[in-house]
Image (tube, rainbow, N blue to C red):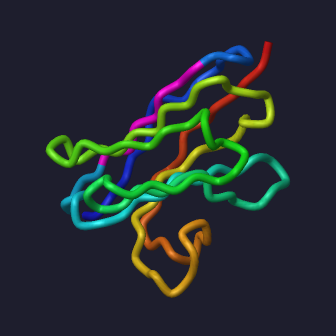
Amino acid sequence: QVQLAESGGGLVQPGGSLRLSCAASGFALASNGIGWFRQAPGKEREGVSYISESGGFTLYTDSVKGRFTTSRDNAKNTVYLQMNSLKPEDTAVYYCAKRTSFAQAWHRPSSYGTWGQGTQVTVSS
């Protein structure tokens, strides 16, 4: 069964850091680009970052550039999202997803076919 599972979320103070992990099972993660998304209450799901199959190409939404870094370890079948200098507006449920279509841009949820269950990130003092 093809699955993705996020972990690493939690409560952190503004300015703090968290590292999220996205572990794949049932398929080789190296075969797919992986996106990170987030969804805050009452808001649409937002594309945060994207990493290509090899990890040689990454993209970020403007609001996280310079603060978030996505990476991957294909040997461990895992993708990571390192989040630094966290702000209250980063509070959301974070999801990873496997890209299955290149017909639309990387930040469109419709470009992805398999999603994890999400992990909550709360940035608050």
* Residue at (79, 36) in percent of width and height: 89
Above or below: residue 24 compared with residue 21 = below
Secondary structure mainly formed by the magenta segment: strand
Residue found at the very far bottom of the displayed protein: 103
Kindly indicate the quadrant of the structure image that contains residue 34: bottom left
Rendered-image quadrant of the C terminus: top right
Q: Is residue 121 left or right of residue 30?
A: right
Q: Is residue 88 left or right of residue 37?
A: right
Q: Position of residue 47 (x, y in %)?
A: 62, 58
* Residue at (37, 42) in percent of width and height: 71
Above or below: residue 35 compared with residue 21 = below
* Residue at (71, 14) in percent of width and height: 13
Looking at the rendering, the stretch of residues picked out in magenta corresponds to 17-23
Kindly indicate the quadrant of the structure image that contains residue 56: bottom left
- The total of numbered circles placed on residues is 0
Q: Is residue 51 left or right of residue 106?
A: left
Q: Position of residue 79 (x, y in %)?
A: 35, 45
Q: Is residue 104 magenta?
A: no
Q: Position of residue 64 (x, y in %)?
A: 66, 42
Residue found at the very far left of the displayed protein: 75
Front residue of 51 and 66:
66
* Residue at (48, 32) in percent of width and height: 82
Above or below: residue 37 compared with residue 64 = below
Kindly indicate the quadrant of the structure image that contains residue 46: bottom right
Front residue of 63 and 16:
63
Rendered-image quadrant of the N terminus: bottom left
Above or below: residue 115 compared with residue 6 = below
Front residue of 73 and 23:
73
